[in-house]
Image (cartoon, rainbow, N blue to C red):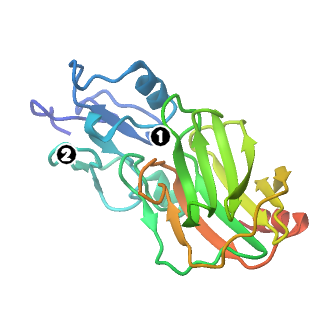
Amino acid sequence: LATPASGDVLIGSDGAVLGFVGTIAWVVIGVGATATVALTTAEETDLSKGIPPATAKVQYMYLLDEGLGTATTNRGNGAGGAGTLGSAATWQFGQVKAPVLSLDGINDYAASASGVNISGDLTWRIVVREKNTHDTALANAILALLRVGANDYLQIAHANAANGLVFTASGNGTSQAVSYTTKPAIGDYRVYHLTLTQAGVLTVYLNGDSIGAVSGVGVVSAASAIAYLGASNTPDQYSNPAILESGLFTSVFTAAQVKASTRYL
């Protein structure tokens, strides 16, 4: 590359002879340290764990997961800012060949149409590549949510109070939760299975192994639910996992079936 022009941003090289050898997975550039836009101590702590600050404080964000072509999109608030890969750079994403739902954690989410049924015996599977450690000093965030209403839902959230993941099932206003405080490294692949019986037993599996079970969940309504990925139903409480798959099965997997399914994936 030629010497960059004034105002250009280069990532991984100075544009001439100095280059970085390695994999760059995520870049966030703020708007500057002024009284109105500076990151708080808690925001700085979260950012070091892969959790971006408030939308207004993100000028440029490059998730670097396009996987093909030479352009990378700015997902922040700055005007323009699309980047171009140099000829020697290659996409790790393209090598892995794993398509994902790309979420930036500041305003991205996905929602299904209404019509999802979360009543009766079920298994919910979600496969992610983690983009943060689920250890936040600030507000809760929603990894995924299946929701009929405030009283009937299944939810996976990383919560500031628990400093980890909380798996919740609620039926007719009676909820139970399984907490898991072992934090992932950024870039880890994880397969989550949640099984819920009509009798109200919630069991949670991580990568094929049970990490907890609770009973006493109320009877979940058979009314239509909506599936949300990366945010709550408002939406708000944004999260930024790279989601490879989310699927709902109308039966309760046994422990052996969960392990076999995880091994296959």
In the depicted view, which residue is nearer to us: 48 or 88? 48
- Name the residue at 42% across, 19% down: 41
Q: 225 above or below 228?
A: below
Residue type highlighted by circle 2: Gly
Q: Who comes first in sequence, dot 1 or dot 2?
A: 1
Residue of label 1: 23
Helix, strand or loop at label 1? It is loop
Residue furthest front as drawn: 173
- Name the residue at 38% across, 55% down: 108
Q: In the picture provided, is 184 more to the left or to the right than 258?
A: left
Q: 254 above or below 160?
A: below
Identify the image quadrant of residue 19: top left
- Residue 150 appears at what percent x and percent y? 56, 60
- Name the residue at 47% across, 60% down: 233
Residue type highlighted by circle 1: Thr
Q: In the picture provided, is 59 more to the left or to the right than 188?
A: left
In the depicted view, which residue is nearer to us: 28 or 148? 148
Residue of label 2: 81
Give the Cα distance between marks 1 and 2. Answer: 21 Å
Please state, as top left, top right, bottom left or bottom right, where the C terminus lies in the image: bottom right
Please state, as top left, top right, bottom left or bottom right, where the N terminus lies in the image: top left
Helix, strand or loop at label 2? It is loop
Q: 14 above or below 238?
A: above
